[in-house]
Amino acid sequence: MEKESLRHPFPAIYAPDSRILILGSFPSVKSREQKFFYGHPQNRFWRVLAALLGTDVPQTAEEKRALLLAHRIALWDVIASCEIMGSSDASIRNAVPNDLSPILETASIRQIFTNGGTAHRLYRKYIYPLTGREDIALPSSSPANAARSLGALIDAWQIVREALEAE
């Protein structure tokens, strides 16, 4: 498999009443094909969120977008463009960060979470110096993070629900 130079293929999801922002690293091959976040069927992101929020797992992009907006969750990725081999975060090179200012200036973001170690490292390297806003690193929902069961992920992600409930 060859390394490709790619730009992020779809926009962020947020609204003025969004309270938290969850940042991934860069969309997987499946997500790029579907032009929507966490498109790989084995990625547990949507199952974890549904469990935290007490809802059914959304199936379509429209249901996923509606779930995020209804619960005041903004969703985006740290990287705007990079060189990447397939879906491998470890292969990311020459990363250019996304500009988070449209989200941070429009929405009432109280907490930023990063989904996985790569998103956290890239956030700290490229975005934190610009915003000065700390992130909370969450264990990756990726199928590559097979060491964590769905239940363990849900437990680790409880802090997201707590952030949403804090008013």
Image: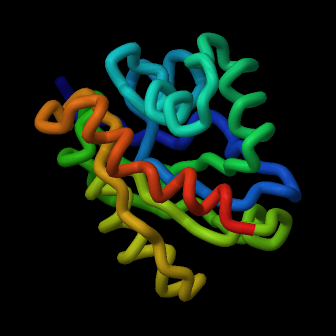
- Note whether 101 is above or below 25 in the view shown: below
72 left or right of 50 in image: right
18 left or right of 137 in image: right
Q: Position of residue 138 (x, y in %)?
A: 36, 55
142 left or right of 70 in image: left
Query: Residue at left 19%, top 37%?
Result: 148
**Residue found at the far left of this picture:** 147
Query: Residue at left 29%, top 50%?
Result: 139
- Note whether 45 is above or below 118 in the view shown: above
- Residue 80 seen by the camera: no
Quadrant for residue 107, please give it.
Answer: bottom right
Q: Position of residue 55 (x, y in %)?
A: 63, 24
- Nearest the eye: 156 or 24: 156
- Nearest the eye: 91 or 138: 138
Query: Residue at left 79%, top 38%?
Result: 70
Q: In the rendered image, which quarter contains the C terminus? A: bottom right
Q: Position of residue 31 (x, y in %)?
A: 48, 25
Quadrant for residue 152, please give it.
Answer: top left
Q: Count the numbered circles shown.
A: 0
Query: Residue at left 26%, top 45%?
Result: 89
- Residue 15 seen by the camera: yes
- Note whether 28 is above or below 13 in the view shown: above
Q: In the rendered image, which quarter contains the N terminus? A: top left
159 left or right of 83 in image: right
Q: Position of residue 64 (x, y in %)?
A: 66, 25
Quadrant for residue 137, please give it.
Answer: bottom left
- Nearest the eye: 28 or 66: 66
